[in-house]
Image: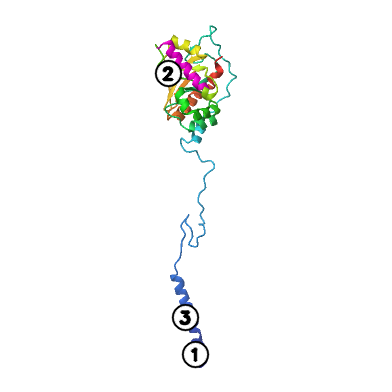
Amino acid sequence: MSATTARRILAVLPLLAILALSACTARHRPTFQVAAGQPSPSGSPSATPSASPSPTAKPAFKSLAWYVSQVPAFTPAPPPQPVPLPADGSAPFWHRVPTEQKVAFITIDDGGLARPPAVIDFIREAHIPVTMFLNSPAAAEHPDYFRQIEAAGGVVENHTINHESLKGRSYDYQKREICGSADKLEALFGKRPTLFRPPFGNRDSTTTKAAHDCGMKAVFHWTETVHEGKVRYQTPEKVVRAGDVLLMHFRPALMDDLLAALKAIHKAGLTLALLEDYVG
């Protein structure tokens, strides 16, 4: 080997050593993998975005939006044809409104046990006409709640002071219960009730006389009851008929009761109407 060739080999050897060391370092350098949805080591967002809520997502079960979404589509109510009252001026006792128009009526009693807050918005958003037969002490204790239902389309009517059975009681006792409640409800809501429902539906001829003397146009019973989301029929046909009056109460399951009543009325081919519009 010549001296020139040896010098060239010695010059190349350091370069080869540097290249070999670089390759070895690259093989052992740690690598980082970013899990989906986790921040990168540098703090920058992950390349995989989090899912955004779908604009068509179904409302949560038994939320207000869910109840509203379950309301069937009713045909518009016909122009009401009020039923004439007895010519002798007495207050009639009706289980249902004697009308052939294809309407039914929702009524809610008492007011002292429970007052679900969502009921106000449900009545407003679903446009549910309701008649509230209130005990005057419950109305006096929670007037703002019932005023909000009034503003949403409800009407306050009379259900006595003490919610005791009137049947067999003296005229003076019955009149005090009916007139006293009417006086209080008028003071609270600015309008005197004109309809009356006796507690438990119990009444006698003294009840209707006392009701009339207190300014009540009619005394109402009911044709169906609704409790815990189930409609209980009073006839073997198990169908809501034109003029029927559905009874429920201010209880914890009132949202379910309202929805069950709406579905039963719609299934019968009827639509909703306000009871007061049909009493002449």
Q: Does the magenta stretch include residue 181?
A: yes
The magenta span reads 169-186
- CA gap, disc 2 to disc 1? 121 Å
Cβ–Cβ below 8 Å for labels 3 and 2?
no
* Distance Cα–Cα, label 1 vs label 3: 17 Å
Q: Position of residue 141 (x, y in %)?
A: 46, 28
Rendered image: mark on residue 89: none
Residue extending furthest toward the bottom:
3
Q: Say what secondary structure mark 3 lies in.
A: helix
In the rendered image, which residue does mark 3 sit on? Answer: 17
Q: Position of residue 274 (x, y in %)?
A: 54, 21
Q: CB under 8 Å between callouts 2 and 1?
A: no
Q: How crowded is mark 2: few (under 14 residues within 10 Å), some or many (20 or more)?
A: many
* Residue identifier under label 1: 6
Q: In this view, does 23 lie above or below 162?
A: below
Q: Is residue 260 at all visible to an observer of this figure?
A: no
Q: Is the magenta stretch mostly helix, strand or loop?
A: helix
Q: Residue furthest right?
A: 79
Per the image, the residue denoted by label 2 is 199
Vertical relation: 57 (above or below) 231: below
Q: Decide if residue 246 is in sight here.
A: yes
Amino acid residing under circle 3: Ala
